[in-house]
């Protein structure tokens, strides 16, 4: 249940623009990767925060719908899994507002520290073509995954 809450808090904090709280959901050393849509992967909690702060001017209202969560591996302080995501919102690009839709899943690794679960790794994978702004500060949202894969181990 705590891992499910973690994924739901991520969506809530993104959508309500609480980017400091988003970053606090990750371990200090982590991996956050949305390169499938052109983002730059980052490797620390501080970099996750900076990534969101840098994008915040171009991010308008948005909403993440996360569902179909599967926790595929679990041991005392580590787990892995995935959840589907439909993210919709508005990009503020140049002088216009452009709607976007992202269809995919998050491939996650979780770590438990001090009785609390965190993301150790969160990688966005696309399932079908996404729609919307062609770029967000160099981020492309028109890439489609060529296959469905879940990391092993």
Image: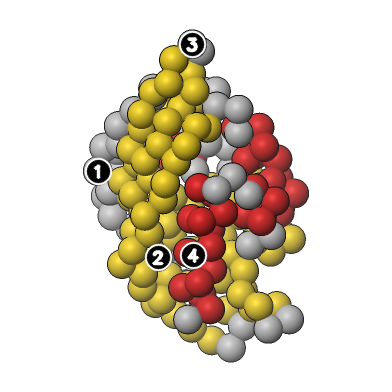
The residue carrying mark 3 is 95
**For the residues marked 3 and 1, what is the alpha-carbon distance in whole angstroms?**
28 Å
> In the figure, 85 relative to 80: above or below?
above
> In the figure, 5 relative to 101: above or below?
below
Q: Nearer the viewer, mark 4 or mark 3?
A: 3
**For the residues marked 4 and 2, what is the alpha-carbon distance in whole angstroms?**
9 Å
Q: Nearer the viewer, mark 4 or mark 2?
A: 4
Q: Is residue 109 left or right of residue 148?
A: right
Label 1 Cα neighbours within 10 Å, binned few <14 / some 14-19 / many ≥20: some
Label drawn at residue 7: 4
Q: Earlier in the sequence, mark 2 or mark 3?
A: 2
Q: Earlier in the sequence, mark 2 or mark 1?
A: 2
**For the residues marked 1 and 4, what is the alpha-carbon distance in whole angstroms?**
21 Å
Label drawn at residue 128: 1
**For the residues marked 4 and 3, what is the alpha-carbon distance in whole angstroms?**
33 Å
The residue carrying mark 2 is 82
In which quadrant of the rendered view does residue 47 lie? top right
Q: Can the viewer see residue 73 in this picture?
A: yes
Q: Earlier in the sequence, mark 4 or mark 2?
A: 4
| Label 3–label 1 contact, CB within 8 A | no
Judging from the image, what secondary structure is the residue with disc 3 in?
loop
Q: Earlier in the sequence, mark 3 or mark 1?
A: 3
* Residue at 42% in and 57% down: 106
Q: Is residue 47 left or right of residue 124?
A: right
| Label 4–label 3 contact, CB within 8 A | no
Q: Earlier in the sequence, mark 1 or mark 4?
A: 4
Label 3 Cα neighbours within 10 Å, binned few <14 / some 14-19 / many ≥20: few
> In the figure, 143 relative to 87: above or below?
above
- Of residue 136 and residue 15, the one placed in the foreground of this image is 15
């Amino acid at each position: 249940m705590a891992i499910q809450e973690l994924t739901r808090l991520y969506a809530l904090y993104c959508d309500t623009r609480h980017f400091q709280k988003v970053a606090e959901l990750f371990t200090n050393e982590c991996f956050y990767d949305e390169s499938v849509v052109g983002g730059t992967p980052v490797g620390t909690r501080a970099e996750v925060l900076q990534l969101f702060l840098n994008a915040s001017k171009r991010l308008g209202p948005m909403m993440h719908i996360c569902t179909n969560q599967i926790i595929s591996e679990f041991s005392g302080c580590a787990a892995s899994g995935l959840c589907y995501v439909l993210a919709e919102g508005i990009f503020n690009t140049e002088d216009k507002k452009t709607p976007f839709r992202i269809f995919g899943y998050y491939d996650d690794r979780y770590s438990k520290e001090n009785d609390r679960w965190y993301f150790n790794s969160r990688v966005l994978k696309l399932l079908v073509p996404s729609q919307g702004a062609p770029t967000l500060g160099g981020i492309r949202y028109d890439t489609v995954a060529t296959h469905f894969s879940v990391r092993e181990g």
